[in-house]
Image (cartoon, rainbow, N blue to C red):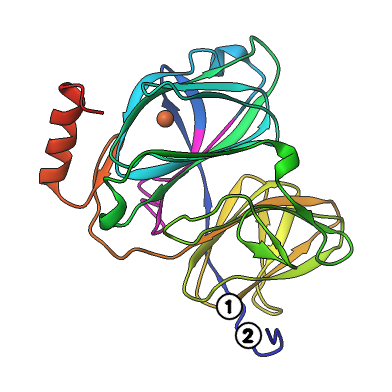
Amino acid sequence: MNTATATTRPVTRVLRGMPASDGAGVRLTRLIGTPLAPEIDPFLMLDEFRSDTPGDYLAGFPDHPHRGFETVTYMLAGRMRHRDNHGHSGLLVPGSVQWMTAGRGIVHSEMPEQEDGLMWGFQLWVNLPARDKMTAPRYQEFAPEAIPEVTPVPGVTVKLIAGELAGATGPVQGVATAPLYFDITLAPGAAWTAAVPASHQAFAYVFAGSADIGAEGHRHTVARSHLAVLGQGGQVELHAGEEAARLLLIAGRPLGEPVARYGPFVMNTREEIEQAFADYRDGRF
Ligand code: FE
């Protein structure tokens, strides 16, 4: 692509997360899915869990259902065991990712497999289009070594979870919203312009250092623990400050469909939510 003429996405909002508690009392920070940022279509929720206090995470997320969307868990530190009612289980270790398409429904638990130490990671909820909400559940799970690491320019490394970059492709494939999910590290003073499809909605979440995001003259400094909502354009300009920065850059094709949402069920209509409750109650997940 011609980066000289592509439009750089502006930062339209910078948000801090809100403290929240979920599962059996896990303390986390909710970045998307709050009154300030109810959703960034197709993304319904983004949580960061980060604590070295066992009381913040030990209770975990015992059995609970999901229907109508996808959950993406990306671990930075710690170990999490998941187990569902169809006999699927797995262990998430640091650097691994699980992209779970809940589709018509699963009931699962997500429990820490450690009693102390740091537990740190993200869970993103990605909506499914109406035609896929009742699809069969599907797991895509990858160990850290299955996630390509690309160096597009000196001083910048990108862990490619979903999407393409410099001839490499992230292992997560076949997702309806054609997502891009990059974990980007910028060395002090490094800069990089990432191509992001203009059709997509995008955001960046800075979780180490700080990054200046946007075109020259329109740059916003986004500090650690802040999420930048990005406007329209075909590329994203990132600059690290005097220290290294690390951030998630996530984009997806918006669905533009009505969202009927109640807890772990995300459908298009209220009737479908009522059906989800009935199916769950009657053991049809
Ligand atoms: Fe879950």
Q: Which mark is residue 30?
A: none
Q: Which mark is residue 234?
A: 1
> What's the residue at 76%, 48% (across, down)?
209
Q: Amino acid at mark 1?
A: Gly
Q: Quadrant of ligand 1?
A: top left
Q: Earlier in the sequence, mark 1 or mark 2?
A: 2
Closer to us: 112 or 82:
82
> What's the residue at 34%, 23% (across, down)?
64
Closer to us: 280 or 202:
280
Q: Amino acid at mark 2?
A: Ala
* Quadrant where the image shows the C terminus: top left
Q: CA distance from mark 1 to mark 2?
A: 6 Å
Q: In the rendered image, which quarter is residue 263 located in? A: top left
Q: Are marks 1 and 2 in contact (CB under 8 Å)?
A: yes
Residue 272: give x, y in percent of width and height: 15, 44
Residue 273: give x, y in percent of width and height: 17, 40
* Quadrant where the image shows the N terminus: bottom right
Residue 144: give x, y in percent of width and height: 72, 38
Q: Which residues are magenta?
A: 29-49
Whether residue 41 is in magenta: the answer is yes
Closer to us: 46 or 71:
71
Disc 1 is placed on an element classified as: loop
Q: Residues within 10 Å of mark 1 (few under 14, many from 20)?
A: some
Residue 81: give x, y in percent of width and height: 55, 20
